[in-house]
Amino acid sequence: MNNNLVTLTEYIIKKLVVDEDSVSVKEFENDDENVIQIEVLISKNDMARVIGRDGRNINAIRTIVQASSSISDGKKININVDSY
């Protein structure tokens, strides 16, 4: 498990949302050992803030986290965002 990437993702997401307490970020196992699967759960009200216009915010988050991964171990990062 790569806690640094999860922590980085959580930090960025929490800076975007209104309800920081509703943010949950976890890493899950993936069939491909070269892929890190990060799942983000946020309030439905914050979904537009995290995704951004035309997906710009979430794509920027993915780029930052992917770049951090490249420095450490070069694995591919999948970040999925869902709401409740």
Image: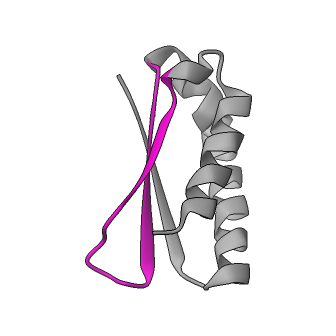
Query: Residue 49 at x, y = what percent?
Result: 64, 26
Residue 72 in which image quadrant: bottom right
Camera-side residue: 51 or 8? 8
* Residue 79 as seen in the image, left or right of residue 9: left
Q: Position of residue 44 (x, y in %)?
A: 44, 19
Q: What residue appears at the point 71 percent right and 70 percent down from the top-left corner?
A: 68
Please give left or right for residue 49 compared with residue 45 in the image.
Answer: right
How many dots with numbers?
0
Residue shown at 65% from the left, 24% from the top? 17
Task: Point out residue 74 in the picture as x, y percentages from the top left corner.
Answer: 61, 85
Residue 24 magenta:
yes
Residue at the spot 73% in from the left edge and 81% down from the top edge: 71
The quarter of the rendered structure image containing the C terminus is top left
- Above or below — where is 60 with respect to 4? above
- Identity of the residue furthest to the left in this view: 31
Q: Where is residue 24 in the image (x, y as percent from the top left)?
A: 46, 35
Residue that appears at 32% across and 82% down: 32
Does residue 39 sit above or below 65 in this rendering?
above
| In the image, residue 16 lies in the stretch drawn in magenta | no
| Colour basis | one colour
Q: In which quarter of the image is the N terminus?
A: bottom left
Region in magenta: 22-43
Q: In this view, does 17 lie above or below 28?
A: above
